[in-house]
Image (cartoon, rainbow, N blue to C red):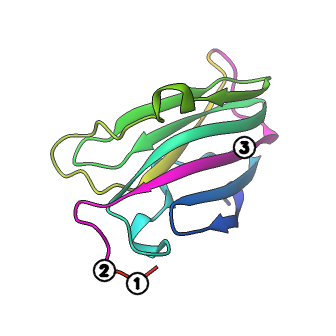
Amino acid sequence: MALAATTQIIQDGARNTIIKFTGVSDGNGESAVLKVDVSALLGAPSDVRIARIDYSMYGLQVRILWDASTDVLAWLLTPEQDNEVDFMRFGGLVNNAGTGKTGDILFTTEAIPGVALASGASYSIVLEMIKQWSSPPAPGSI
């Protein structure tokens, strides 16, 4: 079996995207699972900045990763917390992945250090993102 995960696009506009993710473990986790495919977003941006993360964690932690040849940790969501992290005072978390950078975002779920991942461990995460393009989109394309 596997962790039961859902994705809900709340907003996918010309500049911003908001996506909600939930997951409930059956004792298994996720390992570098694609959660944000930037090419599938409106306007097909090349990248996103993470503006804000709202999250609730129970019995696990989640690593948010920038996808690349060697994935890069964007942020670690720690267990047993309900929290909001706002990065807008400096314009958002910029994707600092190097070689093979895709612009996509992945999740890896992990047990709390020293404790096995239990059935029923769960997360709810809302990512607010700002789209970026390596070259500007054509007028009227988004």
Query: In the displayed structure, does residue 6 sit left or right of residue 136?
Result: right
Instruction: Rate crowding at label 1 as few (under 14), some (14 to 19) or many (20 or more) other CA atoms within 10 Å.
Output: few
Query: In the displayed structure, does residue 103 sit left or right of residue 93?
Result: left
Q: Which mark is residue 27?
A: 3
Q: Which mark is residue 141?
A: 1
Which quarter of the picture shows residue 117? top right
Amino acid type shown at disc 3: Gly
Query: In the displayed structure, does residue 1 sit left or right of residue 96?
Result: right
The residue that mark 2 highlights is 138
Q: CA distance from mark 1 to mark 3?
A: 44 Å
In this orientation, which residue lies closer to the viewer: 42 or 113? 42
Amino acid type shown at disc 1: Ser
Q: Which mark is residue 60?
A: none
Give the mark, 1 or 3, whose residue is nearer the N terminus.
Answer: 3
Q: CA distance from mark 2 to mark 1?
A: 5 Å
Q: Nearer the viewer, mark 1 or mark 3?
A: 1
Q: CA distance from mark 2 to mark 3?
A: 46 Å
The magenta span reads: 114-138
- Residue at 29% x, 36% y: name it: 96
In this orientation, which residue lies closer to the viewer: 85 or 113? 85
Q: Residue furthest front?
A: 139
Residue 113 location (% of width, % of height): 62, 17
Q: Secondary structure at mark 3?
A: loop
Labels 2 and 1 touching (C-beta < 8 A): yes
User: Is 14 drawn above or below residue 60 in the view shown?
Assistant: below
Q: Nearer the viewer, mark 2 or mark 3?
A: 2
Amino acid type shown at disc 2: Ala
